[in-house]
Image: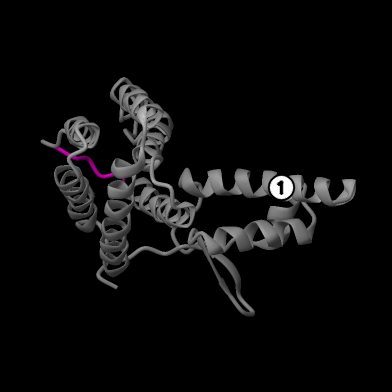
Amino acid sequence: MTTQTRRARANTDDVHARLRAEVLAGTYEPGERLKFAPLCERFGASASVMREALSRLAEQGLVTSEPNVGFSVMTVSLDDLRDLTATRIDLETLALREAIACGGVEWESALVAALHRLDRTPMLTTDLPVRISDEWEEAHTAFHEALLAGCERPRLLGITCALRDAASLYRRWSQRGEPDRDVAAEHRAIAEATLARDADAATEALRAHFQHTTDILAASLPSH
């Protein structure tokens, strides 16, 4: 690989990471067009670099690409949320069973640390309007990644990561309150069953956690 090729790849990786972070932060509205020229100018990227970065986001399901239209942020609907949740349940419970079967002491230690960080991070901001904090989103993602990290199937983990990103966007865009819900207790129940190597209890706790979130978000979404 030439020096020029390495620089181009590094630049693409940087633009992709920055743009992905903006999408996941809810900077853009659902279905919003990602106008090519302004993005190139704002990110200081060439057309080829920006096209590659957007194509990666499309592969990850965060944006869509249509011929003669260009790239847009993913849209939201109740039907899609239900499909997303069902797919996450199928694949993440499979990955969790694999993690419980294969994960070692280092995996257990990392999971305990991720749970502790999540427990200590406030979920909501103190400013108005109240919203889910960036710090909590990061800790929440880290917990779910640590939960499955013992799984030794990289392709499966890659798919679960992409699905998790899409679910995070639904949560960001909804910003609905969750009265009478103890999210921290749900995470602790998942972790405790996992660390006890009780695959049935752990996967059921994870399924219930996903479904509870979906039921809350569904109230704010169109059916199509």
Is residue 145 magenta-colored?
no
For the residue pair 222 and 144, the one nearer the viewer reads as: 144
Identity of the amino acid at label 1? Arg
User: At 44% across and 59% down in the image, what residue appears?
Assistant: 30
34 shown above or below 157: below
Q: As drawn, which residue projects farthest toward the bottom?
A: 68
Q: 10 Å neighbourhood of mark 1: few (<14), some, or many (≥20)?
A: few
Relative to 104, 43 lies left or right: right
Residue of label 1: 42
Question: Residue 102: horizontal and vertical position, in percent?
Answer: 35, 42
* Residue 177 is a magenta residue: yes
Q: Residue at x 54, y 43 (%)?
A: 21
Q: Which residues are magenta?
A: 175-179
Percent coordinates x, y for residue 46 in the rendering: 80, 55
Q: Nearer the viewer, residue 36 or 58?
A: 58
Residue 180 position in % (x across, y down): 10, 36
**Predominant secondary structure, magenta span:** loop
Locate residue 208 relative to residue 52 in the image: left or right.
Answer: left
For the residue pair 116 and 199, the one nearer the viewer reads as: 199
| Location of residue 199 by image quarter | top left
Against 135, residue 190 (above or below) is: below
Instruction: State the quadrant of the C terminus.
Output: bottom left
Seen from the viewer's position, the closer of residues 137 and 192 is 192
- Give the left or right position of residue 71, taking residue 89 as reference: right
Image position of 213 with respect to 141: above or below: below
Q: How is the image coloured?
A: one colour
